Image: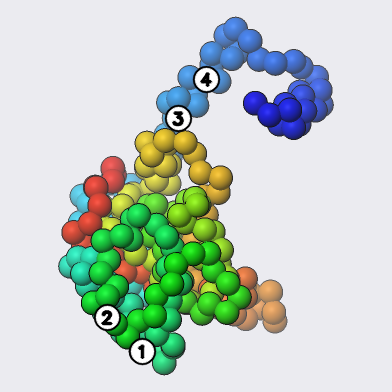
Amino acid sequence: MSAGRERILGGIRKGLGRGKLEGEALAAVEARLSAPARNLIPRRTALPTAELVDLFEKMATDVAATLRRVAGPDDVPDAVAEFLAGLNLPSEIKAAPDPRLDDIPWSKRPTLAVSHGAAADSDLTAVTAATAAIAETGTLMLASSAAAPTRLNFLPDNHIVVLRAGQVTGTYEDGWDLVRAAGALPRTVNFVTGPSRTGDIEQKIQLGAHGPRRLHIILVEDGGETGSS
């Protein structure tokens, strides 16, 4: 543990009037962290995988996201190009340098100008992978890493997320299980439900106030391992 973190935790312990946990108290905390207990789970998520995917699509599109299903990774370049053309947007994307996108043959669509890396102010459209999708609320779970810069999720006006059908889970608890199973916890986990919005201005919903004004999900039906439900 770093000296800075120990100093912060020491201040919290002092404020609580106690020292480091030891013995049974420490064992109880470690047991809880190693086997997190489930809370109240919505019954609507107790579904087979195919129906979970349908539920995710309904919940996501209900909050102004758009979604297109494709058969496999080979179809993603066409889906991206057609999304951009339909909105009269430039055929330029900034894609995450993410191994989960390595099977997408961008060269199949040579009119697409694809660059990789973190988003810059001039980037209008980002393409990222997902960590999981929560059918319960139509929410995308996006974990950060060197290969998945968080700026791609929020800086460009248009966010395209490539989601594998097997990444759709029923609940938030299932999503966290996938994160833990991947190993070390990421620095940041963002939950994104639809495009950015606010109702602060005259109580009218405005899209794109604090992030992308459009969220487009490309659901790859044959990709990824099946998540638990």
Q: Residues within 10 Å of mark 1 (few under 14, many from 20)?
A: few
Residue at the bottom extreme of this rendering: 88
Residue 109 - label? 2
Q: Nearer the viewer, mark 2 or mark 3?
A: 2
Residue at the (62%, 71%) spot, across then down: 210
Residue 36 - label? 3
Q: Quadrant of residue 111?
A: bottom left
First reached walking from the N terminus: tag 1 or tag 4 = 4
First reached walking from the N terminus: tag 2 or tag 1 = 1
Which residue is labeled 4 in the image? 30
- Where residue 162 appears, as percent x and y from the top left, is 34, 64
- Secondary structure state at the residue bearing disc 2: loop
Q: Nearer the viewer, mark 3 or mark 1?
A: 1
* Three-letter amino acid code of the residue under disc 3: Pro
- Where residue 222 appears, as percent x and y from the top left, is 18, 59
Which residue is labeled 1 in the image? 85
Residue at the (70%, 16%) spot, across then down: 20
Q: Quadrant of residue 151?
A: bottom right
First reached walking from the N terminus: tag 3 or tag 4 = 4
Q: Residues within 10 Å of mark 4 (few under 14, many from 20)?
A: few
Q: Nearer the viewer, mark 2 or mark 4?
A: 2
